[in-house]
Amino acid sequence: MSLTLAQFNDFDQDQATSALLTCCTSSRWAHNVASARPFETLEALIAHSDTVWSKVQQQESDLLEALDGHPQIGNVATLKEKYRNTADSAAHEQSGANEADDEVLEALAQGNQAYLDKFGFIFIVFATGKSAKQMLDLLLARLPNERTTELVNAATEQNKITRLRLNKLFE
């Protein structure tokens, strides 16, 4: 789906919220951004999104809701089922995992499970432009962290992804 800012501004609240949920699955974020319409520029929308996210991410349940909208890196097969809203975006964003050899993919799967077991949420990274090996290296570097550190890291990565998806939504 591609929209103009004028179309988005003309949407009713439910339509605008629904469009935003394709960028980030935090319902509070989407509702709050949609409620601030109209936006004069995409830059103003993204700036407001950043402001809303800085508040929303402080509530762990809202952050976890946003993270739940992502498949595990390399687990693109689950996109059509669980992540229908963000499937197209995530498949493109994770395209680096599609080219990886089996050894890297297996290590990524094991690392993802270890991360999920330790922190209680999936490993998330702004994957665009990164190879599976680079994502694996980032995962392994973050795995020793404390949960509070990883919540901050996840929130930062989520916002990068949201910003990319907003730009794509309004191409």
Image: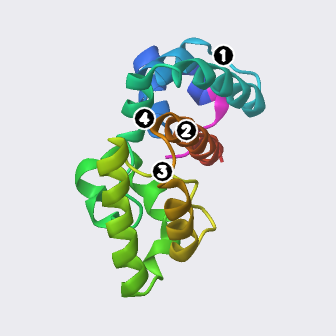
Give the magenta-colored segment's residue range. 1-6
Q: Nearer the viewer, residue 62 or 114?
A: 114
Mark 4 or 1, nearer chain start: 1
Rounded to the nearest whole Å, what is the CA distance between mark 4 and mark 2? 17 Å
Element under disc 1: loop
Residue at 45% over, 40% down: 22
Rounded to the nearest whole Å, what is the CA distance between mark 3 and mark 4? 11 Å
* Residue 153 occupies quadrant: top right
- Mark 3 or 4: in front is 3
Residue underneath mark 1? 38
- Main SS, magenta region, reads loop
Residue underneath mark 2? 149
Q: Nearer the viewer, residue 153 or 166?
A: 153
> CB atoms at circles 3 and 4 under 8 Å apart?
no
Q: Is residue 89 one of those drawn in magenta?
A: no
Q: Is residue 3 one of those drawn in magenta?
A: yes
> CB atoms at circles 4 and 2 under 8 Å apart?
no
